[in-house]
Image: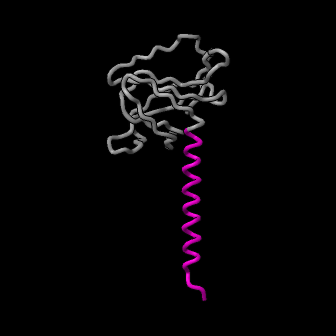
Amino acid sequence: MSEHNHGPSPVGSVVLNLGENIGALILEADASLLGVEIEISPVGADGRHASGSQRTHSMVRERHTVPHPRYDAVYPDLAAGQYTIWQDADVPGATVTIIGGQITTLTLAHAAAAAAAETETKTETTEAAAETKAEEAPSC
């Protein structure tokens, strides 16, 4: 992710081209990500997050809405399919499915919370397995 300073987007400044096999993605963020460019790329046919695949980026911009401003990165004209949202140059952050003719919205806080919950679950599973092995070990 890289950062630039640009002003807010005026009302009605984003045009989305939706079609049978074309969708769009809106990443909802908060003010802390204002100006950050977030990269996405199609997930490979094998389901892998291909770090060398073609990426596109969009900057999180302030959008003047009522009653409060929003902070979004908008990706128009995406071919239907699965996409990786990159946390940084080498680390995938989340996966999202784009459906033709639809706008997909993902809140970045939810994606981060899901990743944290998954990590926590793996840690708990590992700790439980370690406790089981300790109980099964013969005592001397």
- How far across and how far down the image is residue 7, in percent? 63, 16
Please tell me which residue lies in front, 77 or 50: 77
Residue at 65% of width from left, 19% of height from top? 69
Which segment is the magenta one? 111-140
Q: Residue at x 57, y 34 (%)?
A: 108
Establish if 95 lies above or below 135. above
Magenta-drawn stretch contains 34: no
Residue at the farthest bottom position: 140
Quarter assignment of residue 46:
top left
Q: Is residue 1 left or right of residue 17?
A: right
Please provide percent x and percent y for residue 83.
42, 35
Res 65 quadrant in image: top right
Return the x and y of residue 121 as percentages of the image width and height: 56, 54
For the residue pair 42 and 109, the one nearer the viewer reads as: 109
Horizontal relation, residue 104 to residue 9: left or right? left
Q: Is residue 119 magenta?
A: yes
Q: How many marks?
A: 0
Q: Quadrant of the C terminus?
A: bottom right
Q: Residue at x 47, y 24 (%)?
A: 75
Quarter of the N terminus within the rendering? top right
Given residues 88 and 109, the one toward you in this image is 109
What residue lies at 40% left-to-right and 24% top-to-bottom? 23
Q: Position of residue 60 (x, y in %)?
A: 57, 25
Residue 81 horizontal side relative to residue 108, left or right: left
Mostly what secondary structure, the magenta segment? helix
Q: Is residue 106 left or right of residue 51?
A: right
| Nearest the eye: 53 or 130 | 130
